[in-house]
Amino acid sequence: MNTASLIKLASVSAVLALSASPALAATITWANWTSTTAATAGTVGITFTGQGGNLDIDARNWQPVSTWADGVVIGNAPVAGSAIRTRTGGGSQLNTVTFPQAVLNPVFAIWSLGQPNNSADFTFDQLPTFVAGGGAQEYGGIPISVSGNVVRGTGERNGSVIFYGTFQGISWTNPIFENCHGFTVGFDEPAASVVPVPAAAWLLGTGLLGLVGCSRGAGPAAIRLAVRAPASRSIRTRRAP
């Protein structure tokens, strides 16, 4: 088999190897709030400091699933009957959710933001990306809107956002007073978690470059060395679009 044929074969193999494992929506580890200031998410403890609120255990929270989980970025809705319901706002007081260790791609779900003829905001210290939104089982509504660092609800709004990267905390203010809205948080995984990538996934970027560099007169042994891929590599399981 000549060099050109080997290049074609290697290309096909690499494409097949990469396409054999399609990207799946992340299974989010959502907070399970045990008080108005503390929650657990898997083995990770979470704390909340800021404006007063109360623990919301209404089982209708976070339904239907599609309002908070799009099935592409977020694969599952928050824990039913677990949220922090706030009844304040209208000032500059800082609210902060803190993780004891860095987590990857934290997500934020917001319920019942805004009221008819009245808007309410979450102004974050980081840049949120809209993921999903829609009506809620209790009050109906439409998706939240996202502009820069601000998540806004005018009328009745619900939805989720993601913060791409690694974080140990997310802070925000609620500059507009609203009688009632709720939130919860979660994350993709602890930031230290990585998974091995099969050697075939690196073939296109390493073995093919070696093949291109082979001369026409290279023998079979040289070609075999050129297409040999590293045994394994590690990458984060989630990436920003």
Image (tube, grey):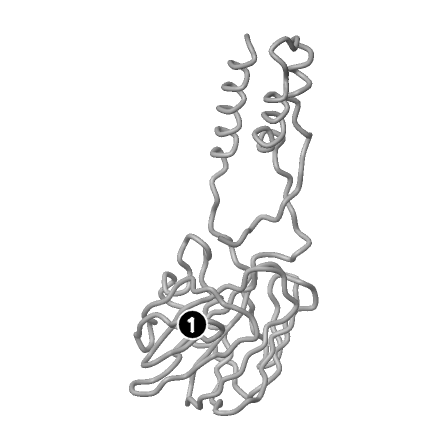
As displayed, is residue 229 above or below residue 56? above
Residue pictured at 56% horizontal, 57% vertical:
188
Secondary structure, mark 1, is: strand
Please tell me how many numbered marks the rendered image carries.
1
Estimate the x, y position of residue 178 in percent, counting from the top left: 42, 89
Residue 48 x/y as whole percent: 61, 78
Image quadrant of residue 137?
bottom left
- For residue 95, what is the image quadrant? bottom right
Residue at the (61%, 20%) spot, across then down: 211
Q: Quadrant of residue 206?
A: top right
Please tell me whether residue 169 is drawn above or below residue 9 in the rendered image.
below
Would residue 223 appear left or right of 186 to someone viewing this image? right
Q: Which residue is mark 1?
A: 147
Name the side, left or right, on which 65 lies relative to 192: left
**In percent of the image, x 46 and y 76: which residue is there?**
150
Q: Amino acid at mark 1?
A: Ser
Q: Would residue 113 be found to the left or right of residue 16 on screen?
A: left
Q: Position of residue 152 (x, y in %)?
A: 40, 77
Give how far across and how far down residue 96 sits, in percent.
Answer: 60, 78
Q: Name above or below for residue 27 compared with residue 93.
A: above
Circle 1 packing at 10 Å, graded few (<14), some (14-19), many (20+), is few
The quadrant of the rendering that contains the N terminus is top right
Report the side of 50 relative to 115 (left or right).
right
